[in-house]
Image (tube, rainbow, N blue to C red):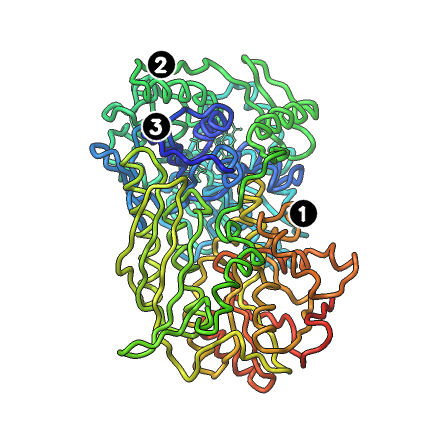
Amino acid sequence: MQSADQLASKQLVLLGIGHTNAHIVRQWRMNPISDVQLTCLSDHTVATYSGMLPAVLAGQLSEQDMQIDLVRLCASAGARLITEQVTGIDPEAKRIEFATRPPISFDVLSVGVGSVPSVQGVEIDSTAPLLKIKPMQSFLQRLNEHVSRLQQIATDSTVRIVIAGSGVAGTEVAFCLPGWLKRNSIEQFDIRIVTGSQRVLNGVTSSLRRRVERALTDRAVTISLNERITHVEPEHVQSLSGAVYEADLVIWATGASPPPLLSQLGLPTDDRGFLLTDETLQSTAAGGVFAVGDSGTVNGTCLPKAGVYAVRQGPALWENIQRSIDCRALKPWVPQSSFMKLLNTGADSAIGEWKGLSFEGSWVLRLKDHIDRRFMRMYQTEGMAQSGHVMQCRGCGCKIAGDILDDALSELTSKPETPPLDDAALIETGAGTVVASTDFFSAPLNDLYLTGRIAALHSASDIVASGANVSAALANVVAPEGDPRAQGEGIRDLLAGAQLEFEAMGGRIAGGHTIVGARWEIGFAVIGTPVGRAVVEKGNLKPGDHLVLTKPLGVGVLLAAHMRSQCAAGHFETMIESMLHRQHRCAGVAAELGITAGTDVTGFGLIGHLNEMLEASGVSAALNLSQIPLLPGAAETFQAGIESTLAPANRRLESLADVGEGIRRQPAWQALFDPQTCGGLLLGIADDRLEEARAALETADIYCFAQVGRVHEQGEQRLIIES
Ligand SMILES: Cc1cc2nc3c(=O)[nH]c(=O)nc-3n(C[C@H](O)[C@H](O)[C@H](O)COP(=O)(O)OP(=O)(O)OC[C@H]3O[C@@H](n4cnc5c(N)ncnc54)[C@H](O)[C@@H]3O)c2cc1C
């Protein structure tokens, strides 16, 4: 038995999960504060460790090495991760507002959204080849978008690269970019640092600067000092002095300026626009609101915006968050007076400085690599898979097994007077025909707004698959016991998310009921009206029909991995995107085309729902495993031995096909038994209508059109597997 969820009475919210706030999530993973819910708000599902970007450019590390996977980190900490755009906060009401979803409450908030390179006073042509260093999560992707253009230039001339800014970021990029250029077959290039400063690396000792300047000269990097760029044009930059520097690519790594969001928070700022705090890192005007890392400025100090300070603030912030929650006096943060500086020079060496002493060599690079990797290891979740008791999967994975259901219903359905039961039942009323269906599940995610959206789409799936229009929905919500504010916000989030989807499908929430129970559960009874020339039914498959699947499989196994904090951020994102992909237009188009054989693939997996169709139609089928689309990450997850808790029950249908061990080991075979939440439609389409159907469904924004098999006359074997 799973233990019941209990709603916390206090809310801790981290806005931006960078160098400081990530420390809180890490602490939470080891030692969560009781009766407090942790919510992480991030504009990306990964955070980047800036100190490693140069090594990635140089080819010493992979992109993954510099990423903290926030989906896994938050899942491992039991924290809610929300990636929607924050538009502001109401410090009085202690609420955070979003562009597209209801606000959330906080008791304690830590703002750590970092900084962005300053473009103040710079005119930028919209067609200029400008590449800002932030957001760093997309820097490499944006850099790679320039590859083919730069490669073309390199075929007959030298590629000219201007790096704006001569701080640590600009300097290390200048050192390490050649590695990236050479890996992309760009051999002829000029790199120039253009800076408004009088010297490179303000604030370091002259001995370190000398070493860096010499290394830059050795690598043929030109430095233009006292040249503040005022214009970025398609083929050059221009400085305040009027000097023009030709550029095929301009990498913008200037000094830190506040992200626009900081000015929308209604909190006091310093003269540059960073949030002003006292020495405890708490906003000078709002109790319970902290500002950390680059985003905050401690009143009366002028510390540089540097990751080392952001990292060192972590433990002080953790202490003060706990004190703030307990209403105890806060402790001051004491910044370190000096710190080790290490710069990657991109060629198997680094330059460093510690307490006024400078040094360089390959051992310095090894030291830097060791420090960086040690930092990143603290945020890794590999090897954290829970052993022993595995929790019951949520979403579709919490369904009752098909055989138990069949037994339970057999007495009822065997009575001759009982009309046949169906997922989407056609009901004749005095006023016409309606299609009715219901579905519900335990919340698969701790973001209830997202869960509400998924629940609406999932509950409407049977109606949509029958080719009917969604008209109205009645909600059933189970809320866990606990804090009334959390209960209220949770119910509101679930229903607001669901309402968005029902309205998008042309329906509405017409009513519902709520009760208190063990955990968040949500579902809808959905009423639809048939449209088009035909109702799509399971029993209409004909020999010769193509079996077409409209979404990839793997939701169940990835949700199971997510519950074990083993679902990577990128895989999580595509899974959510696939679940949220609406199909109501596809089913309508299918019905209009006269496609009458179809169902939706949900809890019993592709095999279970296909079997229902084959049984009802009195036919057999062949499935081609190589054509079964899988969500990114699903294959690896099956291979890692993870599966949804419903998968073993779904495997009762393994005997439908006679297959050998080789096939059983294939992820596509395992995917047949994987329960799907918001899964695709499975349609039977006649051969002569296939291309017409493909074209029509593609215009209806279909997610995919995968021809996974063919229908045959009923044979000895109901299912033949081809690979
Ligand atoms: C190339 C490069 C190399 C550097 N090397 C060093 C170095 O060697 N040593 C050093 O001390 N400093 C270095 N720095 C500076 C260092 O990166 C920053 O000082 C540090 O990242 C600040 O940490 P932070 O937590 O404040 O912000 P960040 O680490 O930038 O984290 C902020 C987070 O907030 C997220 N975010 C932003 N806006 C929003 C929003 N609206 N809603 C939700 N989330 C949001 C971002 O995606 C990000 O994940 C370097 C910087 C660069 C660019």
Say whether disc 3 or disc 1 marks the residue closer to the N-terminus: 1
Numbered mark located on residue 182 in the image: 1
- What kind of residue is marked 1? Lys
| Rendered location of residue 17, percent (x, y) | 44, 35
Residue 437 position (above or below residue 222): below
Q: Which mark is residue 291?
A: 3
Describe the element under mark 1 as helix, strand or loop.
helix
Of badges 1 and 2, nearer the viewer stands 2
The x and y percentages for residue 641 are 67, 45
Tell me the crowding category of disc 2: few under 14, some 14 to 19, or many 20 or more residues within 10 angstroms, Cα based.
some
The type of residue carrying mark 2 is: Pro
Q: Decide: marks 1, 2 in contact (CB < 8 A)?
A: no
Q: Ligand 1 near label 3 (Cβ, under 8 Å)?
A: no
Label 3 element class: strand
User: Upstream in the sequence, badge 1 or badge 2?
Assistant: 1
Marks 3 and 2, the one that precedes in the sequence? 3
* Mark in the foreground, 3 or 1: 3
Q: Nearer the viewer, residue 491 or 313?
A: 491
Q: Amino acid at mark 3?
A: Ala
Mark 2 element type: loop
Q: Which residue is mark 2?
A: 332
The x, y position of residue 45, in whole percent, is 48, 43
Residue 475: x and y in percent read: 32, 55
